[in-house]
């Protein structure tokens, strides 16, 4: 990964072949360096990329937040059609402007600077979309698992971390698994297979017959302090080592949660990482009162259930970072889809049934 200056206020960052969680440190260092140089336009060159996973998408969200704090403008250059679709699906286009090719007058460049930019572009990588959900504009519930209420999901759009109302939080839950016979992909396979039963009693997850597969919908009925909420999530990404669930309109959060297993010496670290913001003002208030602790208890329970299943000690570690503290008042319109409010009639019906 390297950067090249274009004129006085623009630079090009050529990304590595694989964009993943490991890319974060290098990108953060380059953004800090160009900020010191008073560079305001930063173009990310995706041309060399062979593959981007969902952790890589999370890195891009964090870079968009960081660039905004530095008063920098981020651009994405060299995206193939499929990666442009992924940018729209994940909401990354809300924080990173996509440059269409050829990059004429991109980022306010002169004709000479555009020619310089074109000369810097490295040869094309594969930009493989393996693991990603098919492109969609709205969720379509085609299978209703038995027992699921199936409300507030069909025909809804998904919302990424940059499309919520509240502060953007990164919350990471870790469990160390010291069991020689297992590999990281074995842990993820177990998580996918037993994901609904690993949930606490107040959370009912209903996967389809295809299970945790990219593009599938998992319906959720959750008994919260504010009453029963019927919602769901999209399986945004899934491979042998990780999977990511993304929220629709009306869900308490806008964003996603990624489940990842990796080798740490002779042990395996199972990680659950949420990257999200409260979807609307009502949910933000609820999170500040009790919702945040309620949510943290859920993922603690999931990792504890995994530990119990594997017969290992459940020592859960949590890290919380507020990436952006501002409230996005323009996102108050998300309140229209609030699943807590829209589930209210079903809660009243249950009282008299």
Image (cartoon, rainbow, N blue to C red):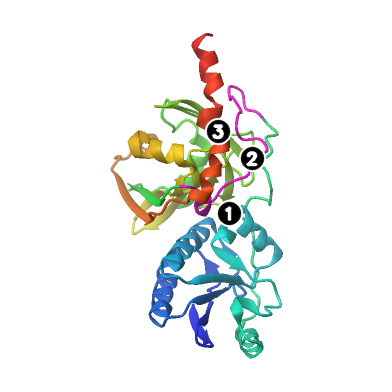
Residue at image location 50% in from the left, 87% down from the top: 8
* Residues rendered magenta in the picture: 144-165
Where residue 293 sits in the image (x, y, percent)? 33, 37
Quick one: SS at disc 3?
strand
Q: Residue 247, can we see it?
A: no
In the depicted structure, whether residue 117 falls above or below residue 261: below
Q: Read off the residue under disc 1.
A: 90
Where residue 350 sits in the image (x, y, percent)? 52, 14
Mark 3 vs mark 2, CA separation in Å = 10 Å
Q: Residues within 10 Å of mark 1 (few under 14, many from 20)?
A: many
Is residue 147 inside the magenta stretch? yes
Q: Earlier in the sequence, mark 1 or mark 3?
A: 1
Q: Residue 63, can we see it?
A: yes
Q: Looking at this view, is 146 or 277 the one in front?
A: 277
Q: Quadrant of residue 29?
A: bottom left
Q: Earlier in the sequence, mark 3 or mark 2?
A: 2
Q: Read off the residue under disc 3.
A: 231
In the depicted structure, whether residue 26 falls above or below residue 61: below
Residue at image location 61% in from the left, 59% down from the top: 87
Residue at image location 45% in from the left, 47% down from the top: 277
Where residue 6 sits in the image (x, y, percent)? 54, 86
In the depicted structure, whether residue 45 falls above or below residue 248: below
Residue at image location 64% in from the left, 67% down from the top: 127
In the depicted structure, whether residue 182 falls above or below residue 341: below
292 sits left or right of 135 in the view: left
The nearer-to-camera label among 1 and 2 is 2
Q: Are marks 1 and 3 in contact (CB under 8 Å)?
A: no
173 sits left or right of 4 in the view: left
Q: Which mark is residue 156?
A: 2
Q: Looking at this view, is 302 or 318 the one in front?
A: 318
């Amino acid at each position: 990964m390297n950067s090249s200056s274009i004129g006085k206020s623009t630079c090009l960052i050529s990304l590595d072949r694989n964009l993943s969680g490991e890319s974060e440190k290098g990108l953060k260092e380059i953004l800090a360096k160009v900020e010191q140089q008073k560079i305001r336009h930063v173009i990310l060159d995706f041309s060399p990329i062979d593959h981007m996973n969902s952790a890589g998408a999370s890195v891009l969200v964090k870079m968009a937040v960081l660039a905004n704090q530095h008063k920098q403008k981020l651009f994405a250059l060299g995206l193939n059609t499929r990666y442009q679709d992924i940018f729209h699906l994940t909401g990354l286009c809300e924080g990173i402007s996509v440059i269409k090719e050829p990059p004429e007058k991109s980022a306010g460049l002169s004709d000479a600077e555009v020619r310089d930019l074109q000369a810097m572009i490295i040869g094309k990588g594969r930009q493989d979309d393996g693991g990603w959900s098919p492109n969609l504009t709205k969720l379509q519930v085609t299978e209703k698992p038995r027992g699921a209420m199936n409300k507030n999901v069909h025909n809804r759009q998904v919302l990424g971390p940059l499309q919520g109302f509240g502060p953007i939080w990164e919350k990471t839950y870790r469990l160390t698994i010291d069991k020689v016979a297992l590999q990281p992909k074995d842990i993820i396979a177990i998580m996918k297979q037993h994901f609904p039963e690993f949930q606490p009693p107040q959370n009912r997850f209903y996967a389809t017959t295809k299970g945790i597969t990219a593009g599938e919908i998992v319906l959720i009925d959750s008994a919260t302090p504010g009453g029963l909420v019927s919602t769901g999530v999209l399986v945004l990404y899934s491979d042998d080592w990780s999977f990511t669930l993304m929220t629709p309109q009306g869900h308490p959060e806008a964003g996603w949660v990624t489940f990842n297993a990796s080798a740490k010496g002779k042990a395996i670290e199972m990680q659950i990482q949420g990257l999200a913001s409260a979807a609307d003002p009502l949910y933000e208030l609820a999170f500040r009162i009790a919702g945040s602790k309620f949510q943290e208890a859920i993922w603690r329970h999931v990792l504890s259930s995994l530990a119990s299943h594997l017969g290992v000690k459940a020592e859960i570690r949590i890290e919380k970072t507020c990436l952006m503290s501002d409230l996005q008042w323009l996102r108050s319109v998300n309140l229209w889809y609030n699943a807590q409010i829209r589930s209210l009639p079903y809660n009243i019906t249950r009282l008299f049934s």
